[in-house]
Structures are given as structure tokens and as C-alpha cells.
Image: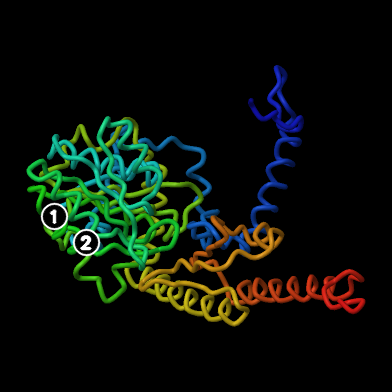
Amino acid sequence: MSVPVPGRLRIEKTRRAEEDLLCHLNDLVSDLHAERPYMLGFPVNLDFTFSRLAGLLDVFADNGSYRDDEPDAMERAVVDFMARLANGSPDGVGGYVANNGSEANRFGLDRGCTLLPDAKIYCSEAAHRSIEMCARLMRKKLVVLACDRRGRIDTNALARQCWRDAGHGCVVVANIGTWKTGAIDDVEAIVAAASPTGSVYVHVDASLGGLLMPFTTSQETWGFAVDEVGSVAVSMHQGLGLPMPCAVALGRSDLVAAESVSGGACSGFASVMLWHALASKGEAGLALNASKAFDMAQYAAKKLADVGLRPVLYPDSITVVFTQPADWICRKYHLATEYGRARIITLPHVSKRVIDELCGDVVRNRRFFKGRWANRSNAPGNNGR
């Protein structure tokens, strides 16, 4: 059953007045700006301003369409920079700007399954739902494994499964920041556990962690520093901040053929905006963003613990998982919830003021309902009961 379109948004046979359309759009922009500080539960960095690039909205930028391939050169600069952040050399790693993280995951899994056609795909139950979609589209067997106590793929379970599949090779998804808890898989332990299958191909889904790991104590050992890692996916709107989804898909050069890079036209618009955002920040600016996000995660975990919400924060993560508060609080702060737990992701737009406001709302809500219960005539303890 389809959801009806609101009358104010229905597209009719006759054209609408430009003033009417702009009125709706201006209201939308105002509403989104007002909600921005309270977007805590979803992995999108909202700390950005691109209004100075408004001229791009009046041109068509499709990589390779013009004699002057400036957007294409900007895309190469982005890939070159991201390859270096992921411990790959520009000569040894190629890739492209993808439309989103799911597409970048599909690119990496396709490269692995092309290299190892008899292999199954292995992932943890914490992997992003796009992994299941990719396996289904590729007609590949997907083996989903449990997580350990730290939210990582259970390498003991992986080893047991790989002994059963000995000799066929395997394609394993390693999460550098699971989308539910932010847990980071141990890639070297994954490779060791998967070795009974023979050849091992690791695809790293670093949708959120790709712009965090380069600024941790693991900066020299993550990504392509491990020989078995063949591809890395990084969602750029998550850690960097962009007004639309896009990602960088990276793969070792010997696995990246021109025909495998994308499924059609590539957005030069995304490449230009990515180049601008990365060049204006530089590696130093990204390091500052990461430091701010890590500090804010520690601050949030402490404040949430102070109000009794039992937060969990894994190492090198900016995802804080805690006891789900009242529904109205979840709506106000756009918290992602599941099975009685909620999560916030402390990207650069998240402030101490809003964390404090969230915790204050939790305390006020608790006091309100405690007071209501105490004042009820039939509450336990009243009338001698």
C-alpha cells in the first residue's frame, strides 16, 4: 500500500508558481537547520557550509564529459589522498567516487568474488545491511557470524566455518566501525582465522571509520597495510560532511580495471565538492575533526553514565550505545534505537550543550514520572498498602 503524497507537494499537470515552490523549500531549509544540532543518532557529519559553491548548481559536471577534464582530475586527487590515508600508495591503489557506501561495498565485494569465484562471503551480524544486498545481487552464498563481547566478528566462529570450507578461498568483510556500535574488527585476526580456506580477500567497510582510523594509534596498520586487504570503502558524507551521500571506493590497482570502476556516469559534482572539502581541511583539519569527535564521545559516555543510562563506548569509536530513554527524547534527538538500546554518534556538529540538554531531559522525564506515580492514590504504599 503506497503512502499518499501530501497535497502541498503533489505535482500536477499545470506548473506551480516559483514563489510557491521557493516558499516550501525555504521552510524545509529552515526546519533542517533548526534540527541540525539535535541529529545525534545517525552517522552524518552536519558541520559543513557549501553555499559559496552555489554556482555548481547551474552547470553539469559528469566526469569525462568535457574537453577540460577538471572534475576527473579532482576525482583522481581525492582517490590519491584517500589511498594514502588508507596506507596505500597512489601507484598501488586505485578507485573512484561512488554514489554511496553501499555502492562502494558492492565494488569491493565484486573485486573479491571475481578474484576468488568459488569463495563464499563472510561477515558478522553487525555488518551493514548492504552486504546482504550485495551477496544477493551477486548470487553468492553469505555466511553471517556472531559478534564477540566487544562487538567484533567472532574470529573463533569464523575459523570453525573456514575449516569446513577449506580450499575454496573466502571473501571477508571487516568492519572499521560497525554501524550499530562502532566496534572495530581485528583484521589480522580475521586473516589468521580465515586462512584454512586458502586464499583470503578482505574487504574493509570503513564507512565511518575511514576518516578516524588514520588519526589513531592504528594509523600505520589499518587498511592496505595488511596484504590480504583488497578493497576499502569510505562514506565521505559521514565523517567529512557533505550535503549529499557519496563514498570513495578503493582497491588494489591490479584488481581495479577501468570497466569495473563504476556502473555508469560518475558525478563530477560530488568529486568537485569532495575535492574542495578535503583540500580546504587538509590532513591536519581531518585530524582535528577526529580528535574532536573522540573527545566528544568520551564526554557523552561520562554524562550518560552520570544519569544512569549505562553507556558502552568501544575503543577508537565515536558511537555511544546506551539504555533507550523515553520515546519523546528519542524523537527530539533523532536517536537510532533497537532492542531497548539507543545510540549517538559524536560527529563534529555534536556539541557539549546538546549532550547536556539530552541528559537533562532524561533526568527531568524521570522526575516527572516518579512524581506522578507518588501522587497517585492507588500507588504502592498509599492507603496502607
Marker disc for residue 336: none
Residue 86 drawn above or below residue 266: below
Amino acid of disc 2: Val
Q: Quadrant of the C terminus?
A: bottom right
> Disc 2 or 1, which lies upstream in sequence?
2
The residue lying at 27 percent from left, 32 percent from top is 138
Task: Determine the secondary structure under disc 2.
Answer: helix
Residue that protrudes farthest toward the top in the picture: 13
The residue lying at 14 percent from left, 42 percent from top is 255
Amino acid of disc 1: Glu
* CA distance for labels 2 and 1: 9 Å
State the image coordinates of residue 50 (x, y, percent, origin top left): 51, 55
Quarter assignment of residue 307:
bottom right
**Which residue is label 1 attached to?**
228
Task: Determine the secondary structure under disc 1.
Answer: loop
State the image coordinates of residue 35 (x, y, percent, origin top left): 66, 58
Q: Are marks 2 and 1 in contact (CB under 8 Å)?
A: yes
Quarter assignment of residue 80:
bottom left
Report crowding for label 1: few under 14, some 14 to 19, many 20 or more residues within 10 A (C-alpha): some
State the image coordinates of residue 305 (x, y, percent, origin top left): 56, 79
Please tell me how many numbered marks the rendered image carries: 2
The residue lying at 37 percent from left, 37 percent from top is 133
Q: Nearer the viewer, residue 356 or 69?
A: 356
**Which residue is label 2 attached to?**
187
The residue lying at 53 percent from left, 64 percent from top is 344
Left or right, 268 with reference to 258: right
Residue 383 drawn above or below residue 6: below
Q: Nearer the viewer, residue 285 or 354?
A: 354
Q: Quadrant of the N terminus?
A: top right
